[in-house]
Amino acid sequence: MKILIACEYSGIVRDAFTRKGHDAMSCDILPTESEGKHYQGDIFDVLYDDWDMMIAHPPCTHLSVSGARWFTEGRKPMYLREQALDFVRKLMEAPIKKIAIENPVSVISSHIRKSDQMINPYQFGHKEQKRTCLWLKNLPKLKETNNVKEEMMKLPIAVRTRIHYLGSKKGKERSKFYTGIAEAMAEQWGAV
């Protein structure tokens, strides 16, 4: 399959699909952090290149519920959120048969449509909590592969929820995708 991983610079999802034999390419305005097929530039330069599947990770800066107060308090202009939502709509409407949009709990659910699935890293072998939503088109819901919630719950809350306390200066680390989820996507969606 020819797969576009939109808004990904880490190469984590791209590499998971490549290891399964797919022709996967990541695309981001940032350079890739790992060797592999990557287009550095605007996603709309390559969005219409006859892809079989797209997995998109639109930036959550102006979409996440955790940052919503900046808009309601007037600290950020509302047009930034509207631009972010318009970007997501364009990704969802791309002429690609199979699409998954990934984002944390966000205003996408209240302004565009509810997510099809909500997952956590602990369902895929990572001892962390970070609710992640998936909006799916012609793809099945992901099945958990290695639920470590019981083990995770034995950890101090600051450890298992560390991602929430990193702050905006650690945005790159906060947005890094989990390898266990990427492997599940490649294994399960790469076969449909």
Image (spheres, rainbow, N blue to C red):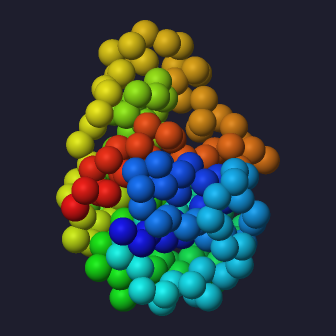
Q: Position of residue 176 (x, y in %)?
A: 61, 47
Between residue 178 and residue 35, name the one nearer to us.
Answer: 35
24 relative position to 139: left or right: right
Whether residue 113 is visible: no
Q: What is the total number of numbered labels drawn onto the structure image?
A: 0
Between residue 33 and residue 60, name the one nearer to us.
Answer: 33
Residue at point 66%, 82% (across, down): 42
Residue at point 65%, 35% (across, down): 165
Residue at point 58%, 66% (across, down): 26
Above or below, 147 relative to 24: above
Dividing the image into 4 quarters, which one contains the C terminus? bottom left
The image quarter containing residue 180 is top left
158 relative position to 138: left or right: right
Whether residue 177 is visible: yes
161 relative position to 52: left or right: right
Residue at point 25%, 56% (across, down): 191
Q: Position of residue 33 (x, y in %)?
A: 72, 52
Which residue ends up furthest to the top in the rendered image? Answer: 154
Dividing the image into 4 quarters, which one contains the N terminus? bottom left
